[in-house]
Image: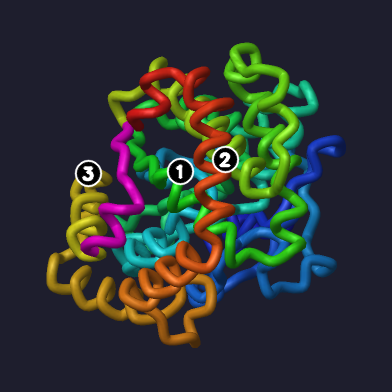
């Protein structure tokens, strides 16, 4: 690297990684951009073409630093909101869905070994933004297949796993765009290939009759992935349900902050959670809140009740009997 001062400067940020070339793409980003961006993946408002490309093997080793904390999740379960509520600088900076993790997840799915990449580059991603501050990493749900590998880099790190009920998961899809719905088969297949669940499913379960049933398959497959890796390493993880978050934003954020040992003063966390809870997590300029979300969900349940009931019944016949108790009870 040209400038050694980049080593301890978290704003010199690894925005991308070329797996085949083993090259890291670095850009200068501000803490404010990290905080305001819903995701720090390819949707980050940055000039990716201006990135400085550094061979992975040229990165110097970093001095010991505090381990990151983790927010794992299934799809559409309020993880962006929870990550925003916990992002209280200088105590914690939340990295929502860094692109590096998606690259590693894709490579792992293609049969490549990615552990060496993770050991070398995770410390660069997780550099604290303030003295005594911590970093929370919220991987994309597509990276559930590498969860154990990532957490093994920091054996002392803790995490939260955020999940939702089947009905909530299906309702969330009723307001998604056609483009999002078209991705369901790929996302379901991705989760299916990351566990042994597919071996227990009847053949008919792999051909859902409509997008909502496909979403049910994705929900079940993601929970199976989580159940399998929790069976191997559960001591550092805590399950949190979207229903708990929705019922009381502050209680959920406070519980997560205490488990993750973030050290955020309660009054500061309270005021921040109140501010986050009044706007849309993925569109912070839009007024929103738990009451509005619940009204929308109730309206969707009423408008699409037949579709919901049909998808729930299909899941009860095709999916739930094949699921492990641990996956059902997450």
Q: Residue furthest front?
A: 306
Compare residues 125 and 248 and report the one nearer the observer: 248
The label number, if any, that marks residue 75 in the structure image = none
Residue 8 visible in this rendered orientation of the protein:
no
Q: Quadrant of residue 162?
A: top left
Q: Is 54 rendered above or below residue 37? A: above
Q: Is residue 179 magenta?
A: no
Do the numbered discs 1 and 2 sit on residues whose CB atoms are within 8 Å?
Answer: yes
Q: Position of residue 86 (x, y in %)?
A: 33, 61
SS at badge 2 = helix
State the extent of the magenta-drawn residues as a range.
237-248
Mark 3 or 1: in front is 1
- Whichever of callouts 1 and 2 sits on the residue coming sooner in the sequence is 1
- Classed neighbour count for the residue bearing mark 2: other residues with Cα under 10 Å, few (<14), some (14–19), many (≥20): many
Would you name the residue on which mark 2 appears?
Answer: 216
Would you name the residue on which mark 3 appears?
Answer: 259
- Whichever of callouts 3 and 2 sits on the residue coming sooner in the sequence is 2
Residue displayed at 13% across by 72% down: 267
Q: Position of residue 140 (x, y in %)?
A: 58, 48
Q: Position of residue 83 (x, y in %)?
A: 41, 59
SS at badge 3 = helix
Residue displayed at 48% across by 86% down: 286
Would you name the residue on which mark 1 appears?
Answer: 166
Residue displayed at 76% across by 61% down: 179
Q: Is residue 90 left or right of residue 259?
A: right
Do the numbered discs 3 and 2 sit on residues whose CB atoms are within 8 Å?
Answer: no
Residue displayed at 77% across by 21% down: 111
């Amino acid at each position: 690297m040209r400038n050694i001062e980049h080593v301890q400067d978290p704003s010199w940020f690894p925005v991308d990684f070329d797996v085949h070339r083993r090259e890291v793409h670095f850009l200068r980003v501000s803490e404010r951009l990290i905080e305001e961006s819903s995701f720090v993946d390819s949707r980050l408002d940055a000039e990716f073409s201006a990135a400085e490309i550094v061979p992975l093997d040229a990165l110097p080793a970093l001095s010991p630093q505090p381990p990151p904390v983790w927010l794992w999740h299934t799809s559409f379960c309020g993880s962006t909101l929870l990550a925003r509520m916990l992002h209280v600088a200088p105590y914690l900076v939340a990295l929502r869905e860094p692109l590096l993790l998606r690259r590693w997840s894709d490579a792992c799915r293609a049969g490549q070994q990615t552990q060496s990449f993770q050991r070398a580059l995770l410390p660069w991603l997780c550099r604290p933004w303030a003295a005594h501050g911590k970093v929370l990493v919220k991987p994309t749900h597509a990276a559930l297949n590498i969860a154990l590998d990532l957490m093994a880099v920091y054996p002392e790190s803790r995490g939260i796993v955020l999940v939702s009920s089947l009905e909530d998961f299906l309702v969330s899809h009723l307001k998604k765009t056609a483009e999002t719905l078209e991705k369901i088969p790929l996302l379901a297949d991705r989760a299916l290939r990351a566990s042994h669940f597919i071996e227990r499913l009847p053949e008919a379960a792999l051909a859902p009759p409509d997008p909502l049933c496909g979403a049910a398959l994705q929900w079940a497959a993601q929970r199976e992935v989580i159940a399998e890796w929790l069976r191997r390493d559960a001591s550092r993880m805590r399950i949190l349900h979207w229903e708990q978050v929705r019922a009381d934003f502050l209680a959920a954020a406070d519980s997560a902050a205490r488990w993750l040992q973030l050290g955020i003063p309660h009054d500061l966390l309270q005021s921040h959670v109140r501010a986050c809870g009044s706007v849309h997590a993925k569109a912070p300029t839009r007024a929103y809140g738990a009451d509005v979300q619940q009204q929308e969900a109730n309206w969707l349940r009423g408008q699409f009740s037949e579709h919901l009931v049909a998808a729930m019944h299909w899941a009860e016949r095709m999916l739930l009997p094949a699921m492990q108790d641990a996956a059902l009870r997450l």
